[in-house]
Amino acid sequence: MDRRELGTGTRLVRAARSLPSGDGQPVVPPLVQSVAFDYGSAADQDAVFGNDRPGYVYGRYGTPTTAALESALADLDAAGAATCFVTGMAAIAAAVDACAVSRGGRVVAPEDCYGQTRALFERWVRERGADISFVDTTDLAAVDRALADKPTTLLYAEVIANPLLRVSDVSALAALAKAKGAALAIDATFATPILVKPATLGATMVIHSLTKYINGHGDVMGGVVSGSAELAATMRDRTILDGGYLPPHEAWLTIRGMRTLALRVRRQCASAMEIASHLVSHPKIARVRYPGLPDHPQHALATRQFNGLYGGVVSFQLRDDTRAAAFRFLDSLELAASATTVGDLFTEVLYPAISSHRRLPVEERKRLGITDGFLRMSVGIEDTDDLVADIDRALDRV
Ligand SMILES: Cc1ncc(COP(=O)(O)O)c(C=O)c1O
């Protein structure tokens, strides 16, 4: 066919289908938004669909920009492969369902995990009869008892739990899980690979919400599950059939964001340490939870496990342990945003009682220590002195 004979409409819909080639490699990966991929040979296309050779066929099966992110994340996590999802929750749901719940396997999970992870697991118990037990994953004897109770397929933990900031011992959990033939899934969202790489300590799979530190700029939602190539094949089947694949534009922004992860996290950890130390002696504060403080129950473990860093999140309880005081504090902040996320460049304060832990029965929430005056601060990269002044001003008004 002579393309010059084609009509304008036909030429328009076929315009710019590939990038012009030339010398020089781009230093930033191209954003390939294409959903479908054209094959000159049906046999080649068949081979890619059949996994006989690598390639791209259709969005949910994998696309070049998201694949570039997946390969970078696998490297960052020291894992064999990684699969990206549209949100952290989609990653958690895919991993825990595929590796345990859908196969009738039992799960042992943390009682103090991210509120919506717990809400999802509780919903699976109610609606699907899933066998999920909740324990304190920092209490190794309790974990061992829970695993000994009944055959368990998956032990799940958050290495720094949201929002109480309890620290789990990944090597010890891996040993307990291995002894009972269970896999170990670690949500390392709060720690990031800058503090710890759970796959190197024996975790079977590592999950991050990319929405938090890894992207770090508050403009992308995403999640990732890292682990073996076999796990990646199972996760890919989830993106294909359940449809929760991370679109290329989000992947491109995440690649851009993660380039500064190490710089941001080190800075956030240093500021968080200063803020936690300042709050300890503040008369309006009843209790500070931060793994870097010597009175944190897992301080020694955190020191050993996290490369001398302790994370960018500080949680604290107001002495006036009421909702009214928490609201006054939030409303009085001028620099820190009262917003429901962590890991951004900007400082953000979350009030779990009305947000992440809203669905948890009030008695259970309070039993865990998430009281009415409990707040969680994700420290950003602003100048630390300005943050301390903002906190002090807001506390003065409580
Ligand atoms: C520890 C942890 N895991 C997973 C998630 C879920 O991530 P996403 O909001 O991207 O679905 C969150 C969200 O706050 C979280 O804090």
Image: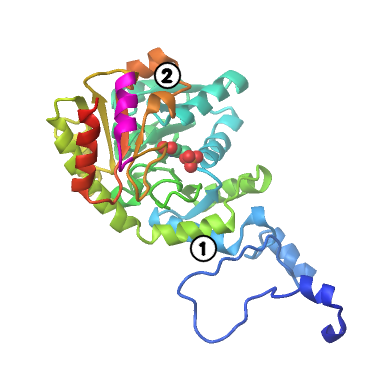
Numbered circle sitting on residue 149: 2
Residue placed farthest to the left in the image?
281
Q: In which of the image's four quarters is ligand 1 placed?
A: top left
Q: Quadrant of the C terminus?
A: top left
User: Where residue 195 sits in the image (x, y, percent)?
Assistant: 29, 48
Residue identified by numbered label 1: 68
Q: Main secondary structure of the magenta part?
A: helix
What amino acid is labelled 1 in the image? Answer: Ala
Q: Is residue 138 magenta?
A: no
Residue drawn at x 14%, y 25% as measured from the top left: 283
Badge 1 vs badge 2, beta-carbon distance below 8 Å: no
Please identify the quarter of the rendering in which residue 327 is found.
top left
Mark 1–mark 2 distance (CA, rounded to whole Å): 42 Å
Residue drawn at x 53%, y 39% as measured from the top left: 95
Q: Secondary structure at mark 1?
A: helix
Q: Give the side of residue 124 with respect to residue 199, left or right.
A: right
- Upstream in the sequence, badge 1 or badge 2? 1
Is residue 146 in view?
yes
Crowdedness near tag 1: few (<14), some (14–19) or many (≥20) residues, C-alpha within 10 Å: some
Q: Give the side of residue 61 with respect to residue 122, left or right.
A: right
> Considering depth in this image, is 189 or 178 the residue closer to the camera?
189
> Considering depth in this image, is 358 or 367 the residue closer to the camera?
358
User: Where residue 389 sits in the image (x, y, percent)?
Assistant: 19, 41
Q: Examine the rendered structure and indicate whether residue 196 appears above or below residue 369.
A: below
Residue drawn at x 42%, y 36% as measured from the top left: 340
> Considering depth in this image, is 376 or 329 the residue closer to the camera?
329
Number of numbered discs overlaid on the protein picture:
2
Residue range corresponding to the magenta coloring: 324-336
> Between tags 1 and 2, which lies in front?
1
User: Where residue 263 sits in the image (x, y, percent)?
Assistant: 29, 58
Q: Give the side of residue 398 with respect to residue 28, left or right.
A: left
